[in-house]
Image (cartoon, grey):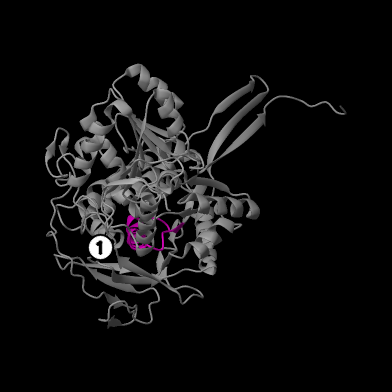
């Protein structure tokens, strides 16, 4: 149950209204993205066996699912369907600006295309000792070439260069993201990557504005000032649902204030993190500033959380794992922790709402990224007087979404990321049926290849049902009803999570009351799911600690030092 995040532009207002293809008032949405024109033909699914290239020889392995040997710090070439374009991806660990083999592990991480279930590549699986090496590199860089040794102007220049390089390579990175994660190419390119570039530029703008305070104590004798210093070496653990975007969310504020990084990408989606590491070198960052160690969570994640020379750990993922990380951080060196965890977000539809627009946003809230989003509006509650009409409208909207291979231009939703996630989502769909919820859309497995779950909507729900209480992380929606505003607030807040909530109403007084009463870190009014680089994001209750985005995220990577200066007082002794 990994958590995740989305960045959408204002043109998303008309999403899912016209099968994600027609022109909206705000510009072309999804099918006609604001970046470069699409060059990939639609519908192509064939993926040849990958070509592995070691550092000393070339080896082609045509048998599906097998690996070349040795794979120490090698490169794999992956073919993009439809174009035949080759994308080279390093398979080693990225430490000190070099791709290197593990110091002691022969384990590998196999990457699979969730749209075809075919093997893409194998990368080195780092060990706890590899984390030690990466931390040592990050510490050396912090003490010598980064940290307090470079100005904010220098950090900003490098971050803007990195953003430029990602923008330059947006097509290639999006193709790799689609192959490894399954999301539609146009969404990966226009939204995930487009807004990741924006995130880096936003924090590059902050890099030379990290300032403390001067504080008057006694005008003639005492003076104090504070310095906002980088906290040090940061371990960052990111999920699989927005691999590039979560990379940017974590890396950008840390680099802006002067921290160094040991990054552990998800074992399901390590390829774009490795590709981005090449751009770290090209941008000119000193060795050791950013290090990337793909590994299993139980190995690399555990090593980062408990490492005594890591000063801060940032994690996006499940609440269960977040608890383990917090415990390990406390028992090791009491390192600072920020956690962006799970959610079971409510989405309320009041009788005064514009029902057509409310249905659009409700569909977006649960179907965007195939529901693999910790803010997914997976619990919709509708006022009784409009319930039947809203259900009819919502089902119509959900049916319009085309779910399929991400390189098909008509597609607005892809498969879930893995067989593990596929089985988990389907277990919840079956539980919903068994516990008596009414299935009004979806709920039938496809017979073809790929980890596809079509939009699924349940009604006639009760509070104790698993589909109502648990974070599913798939395109599965539970729809209930309420009578009064008080009832709506009560049912919305009846969860251990508090990441996000949304509601629709044209009553301004009601909007103020409800937004104040909902217990969540982000509240959307007459919209759902939009996040911006300059607006703080994070949870309440069991949805996490700390904040991403905005100026608030900078404080997660800052240590405040107070300097108190005596400029005139003479101390008498003894007391």
- Position in image of residue 473 (x %, y %): 37, 51
Point 14% across, 65% down: residue? 83
Say if 256 sits above or below 55 in the image.
above
Q: Which residue is mark 1?
A: 115
Element carrying mark 1: loop
**From the viewer's perspective, is 129 left or right of 340?**
right
**From the viewer's perspective, is 412 left or right of 302?**
left
Say if 427 sits above or below 63 in the image.
above
Q: Residue furthest right?
A: 574
Q: Nearer the viewer, residue 267 or 424?
A: 424
Q: Check residue 272 for magenta coloring.
A: yes
Q: Residue furthest top?
A: 509
**CA neighbours of label 1 inside 10 A, class few (<14), some (14 to 19), many (20+):** many
From the image, which quarter does the C terminus lie in?
A: top right
Q: Check residue 46 for magenta coloring.
A: no
Q: Is residue 315 visible?
A: yes
**From the viewer's perspective, is 30 left or right of 202?**
left
Say if 377 sits above or below 265 in the image.
above
Res 568 → quadrant: top right
Give the total number of marks visible in the rendering: 1
Res 499 → quadrant: top left
- Position in image of residue 431 (x %, y %): 40, 53
Point 18% across, 52% down: residue? 411
> Which range is magenta?
263-286
Q: Nearer the viewer, residue 276 or 192?
A: 192
- Position in image of residue 442 (x %, y %): 26, 51
Say if 5 sits above or below 61 in the image.
above
């Amino acid at each position: 149950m990994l958590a995740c995040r989305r960045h959408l532009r204002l043109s998303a207002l008309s999403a899912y209204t016209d099968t994600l293809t027609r022109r909206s008032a705000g510009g072309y949405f999804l099918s006609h993205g604001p970046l470069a024109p699409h060059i990939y033909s639609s519908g192509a699914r064939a993926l040849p066996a990958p070509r592995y290239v070691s550092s000393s020889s070339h080896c082609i392995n045509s048998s599906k699912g097998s690996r070349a040997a040795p794979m120490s710090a090698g490169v794999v070439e992956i073919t993009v369907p439809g174009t035949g374009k080759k994308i080279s991806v390093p398979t080693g660990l990225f430490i000190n600006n070099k791709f290197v083999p593990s110091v002691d592990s022969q384990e590998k991480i196999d990457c699979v295309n969730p749209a075809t279930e075919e093997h893409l590549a194998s990368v080195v699986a780092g060990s706890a000792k590899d984390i030690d090496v990466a931390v040592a590199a990050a510490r050396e860089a912090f003490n010598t070439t980064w940290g307090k040794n470079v100005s904010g102007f220098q950090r900003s220049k490098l971050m803007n260069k990195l953003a430029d390089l990602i923008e330059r390579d947006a097509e290639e990175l999006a193709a790799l993201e689609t192959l490894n994660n399954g999301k539609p190419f146009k969404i990966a390119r226009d939204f995930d990557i487009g807004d990741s570039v924006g995130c880096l530029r936003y924090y590059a703008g902050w890099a030379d504005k990290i300032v403390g305070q001067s504080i008057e104590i006694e005008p003639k004798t005492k003076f104090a000032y504070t310095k906002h210093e980088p906290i040090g070496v940061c371990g960052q653990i990111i999920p699989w649902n927005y691999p590039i975007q979560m990379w940017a969310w974590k890396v950008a504020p840390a680099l802006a204030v002067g921290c160094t990084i040991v990054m552990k990408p998800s074992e399901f989606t390590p390829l774009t993190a490795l590709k981005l590491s090449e751009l770290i070198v090209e941008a000119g960052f000193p060795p050791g500033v950013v290090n990337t160690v793909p590994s299993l969570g139980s190995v690399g994640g555990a090593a980062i959380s408990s490492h005594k020379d890591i000063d801060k750990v940032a994690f996006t993922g499940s609440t269960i794992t977040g608890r383990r990380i917090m415990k390990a951080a406390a028992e090791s060196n009491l390192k600072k922790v920020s956690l962006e965890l799970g959610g079971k977000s409510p989405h309320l539809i009041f009788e005064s709402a514009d029902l057509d627009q409310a249905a659009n946003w409700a569909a977006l809230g649960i179907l965007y990224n195939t529901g693999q989003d910790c803010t997914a509006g997976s619990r919709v509650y509708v006022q009784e007087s409009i319930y039947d009409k809203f259900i009819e409208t919502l089902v119509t909207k959900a049916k319009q979404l085309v779910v399929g291979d991400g390189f098909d231009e008509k597609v607005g939703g892809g498969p879930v990321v893995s067989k593990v996630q596929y089985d988990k989502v389907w277990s919840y769909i079956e539980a919903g049926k068994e516990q008596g919820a009414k299935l009004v859309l979806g709920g039938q497995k496809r017979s073809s290849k790929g980890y596809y779950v079509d939009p699924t909507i349940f009604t006639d729900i009760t509070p104790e049902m698993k589909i109502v209480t648990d974070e599913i992380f798939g395109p599965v929606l539970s729809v209930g009803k309420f009578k009064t505003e008080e009832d709506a607030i009560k049912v919305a807040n009846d969860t251990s999570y508090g990441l996000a909530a949304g509601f629709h109403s044209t009553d301004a007084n009601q909007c103020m009351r409800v937004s104040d009463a909902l217990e969540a870190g982000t509240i959307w009014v007459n919209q759902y799911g939009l996040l911006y680089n300059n607006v703080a994001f994070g949870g309440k209750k069991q949805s996490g600690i700390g904040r991403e985005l905005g100026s608030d995220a900078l404080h997660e990577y800052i240590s405040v030092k107070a300097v108190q200066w005596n400029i005139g007082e003479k101390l008498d002794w003894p007391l």
